[in-house]
Amino acid sequence: MKCPACGHPEMVAKNKDETLSFGSQSLTLHTMHGEFCPVCDEGIWDAESYRRYTEAQAALLRAVKGDISAEIRRIRKSLKLTQTELAEAFGVGKVAFSRYERGETRPPAPLVKLLKLVERHPDLLAEMRGVSTQGEHPRGITSRSTRTAK
Ligand SMILES: [Zn+2]
């Protein structure tokens, strides 16, 4: 078989271990079989190894999602807030945190970052409650009717 990456004419069949990692999780698949390029190390798994690879990838993703759920719950508990109280402070729907903690919905990355910031600086919570999520009405700017017509 010709290497699909560099065009080297001969791929070598061999077994090897493949480590997948995602977020804080990693997983090693042993004795994966495929053909590999001796020049650029590009590899093509055989059907069985490819199936194991995609299954492992899915399992890893589930594990990472579980991680985020557990992390959110842990931070919320450390802040001594109910899911509803936290949702109010964040300006999201009442059931949002319940969904995140059960892994039903993947929390948006900015929310996770904000939550981690609040964990480090719990005094931000009081400020967050006072911050509106609505756009402020711009002051000193008059309405669009003053725009010049084309
Ligand atoms: Zn190659």
Image (spheres, rainbow, N blue to C red):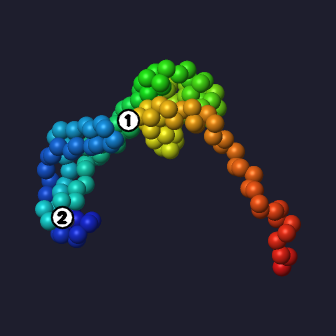
Residue 100: x and y, percent? 51, 30
Which x, y percent locates residue 134?
70, 45
48 or 110, nearer to the observer: 110
Task: Name the residue located 33 percent from the left edge and 42 percent from the top edge.
Answer: 22
Can you identify the residue that label 1 sits on?
Answer: 64
**Residue positioned 17% across, 43% down in the render:** 17
Q: Is mark 2 within 8 Å of ligand 1?
A: yes
Give the quarter of the image for residue 98. top right
| Residue tagged 2 | 40
Q: Quadrant of the N terminus?
A: bottom left
Q: Is residue 13 above or below residue 134?
A: below
Q: Position of residue 38 (x, y in %)?
A: 13, 62
Residue located farthest toward the bottom when viewing the structure as drawn: 150
Q: Quadrant of residue 55?
A: top left
Query: Residue 149 location, x and y as percent?
Result: 85, 76
Position of residue 107 in the picture relative to residue 7 (left or right): right
> Looking at mark 1, is its residue's CB closer than 8 Å to ligand 1?
no
